[in-house]
């Protein structure tokens, strides 16, 4: 999957799941603020990314991923590994 395709898919999946506009999801935006995540919904997001894209994310890793750009890079790298 090309990175641009991956970015579009991640945005679509997250916008639908967390009921936000796709336009609100920008590379520089803070994930927690944009998706209005608390600790429980953050776990939901991780589970969703893992199931949709076939990657494994450890709790310590997800804490470091603060922006959508970092999330795109993280998932893209995991998919290539």
Image: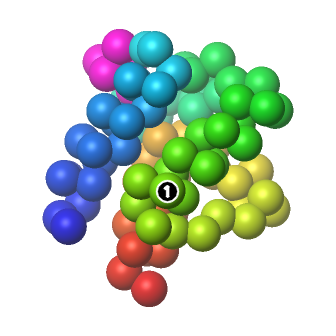
Q: Is residue 34 visible?
A: yes
56 to 52, vertically: above or below: below
Position of residue 11 measured from the top left corner of the image (x, y, whole percent): 34, 35
Residue furthest to the bottom in view is 81
Count of numbered badges drawn on the protein: 1
Q: Position of residue 76 (x, y in %)?
A: 38, 66
Q: Quadrant of the C terminus?
A: bottom left
The single residue placed furthest to the front in the displayed view is 51
Residue at image coords 79%, 58%: 59
Residue 81 is covered by the magenta coloring: no
- The image quadrant that residue 34 belongs to is top right
Front-most of residues 8 and 66:
8
CA neighbours of label 1 inside 10 A, class few (<14), some (14 to 19), many (20+): few
The residue under label 1 is 51
From the viewer's perspective, is residue 50 above or below residue 15? below
Residue 30 image-quadrant placement: top right
Q: Is residue 64 visible?
A: no
Q: Main secondary structure of the magenta part?
A: helix
Q: Where residue 2 sits: x, y (%)? A: 18, 64
Residue at (24% x, 60% y) in the render: 3
Task: Please give the name of the residue rendered at 47% of the width and 26% of the height, measured from the top-left corner.
Answer: 17
Q: Give left or right: position of 2 versus 11.
A: left
Residue at 40% over, 24% down: 15
Q: Position of residue 45 (x, y in %)?
A: 60, 40
Quadrant assignment, res 6: bottom left
Q: Quadrant of the N terminus?
A: bottom left
Q: Find numbered disc 1 in the image and state the secondary structure of the residue it sits on.
A: helix
The span picked out in magenta is 21-25
Q: Where is 3 relative to 46, above or below?
A: below
């Amino acid at each position: 999957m090309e990175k641009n395709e991956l970015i579009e898919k991640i945005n679509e999946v997250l916008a639908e799941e967390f009921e936000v506009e796709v336009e609100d999801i920008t590379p520089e935006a803070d994930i927690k603020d944009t998706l209005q995540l608390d600790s429980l919904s953050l776990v939901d997001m991780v589970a969703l990314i893992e199931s949709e894209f076939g990657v494994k994310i450890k709790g310590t890793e997800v804490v470091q991923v603060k922006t959508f750009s970092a999330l795109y890079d993280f998932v893209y790298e995991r998919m290539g590994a």
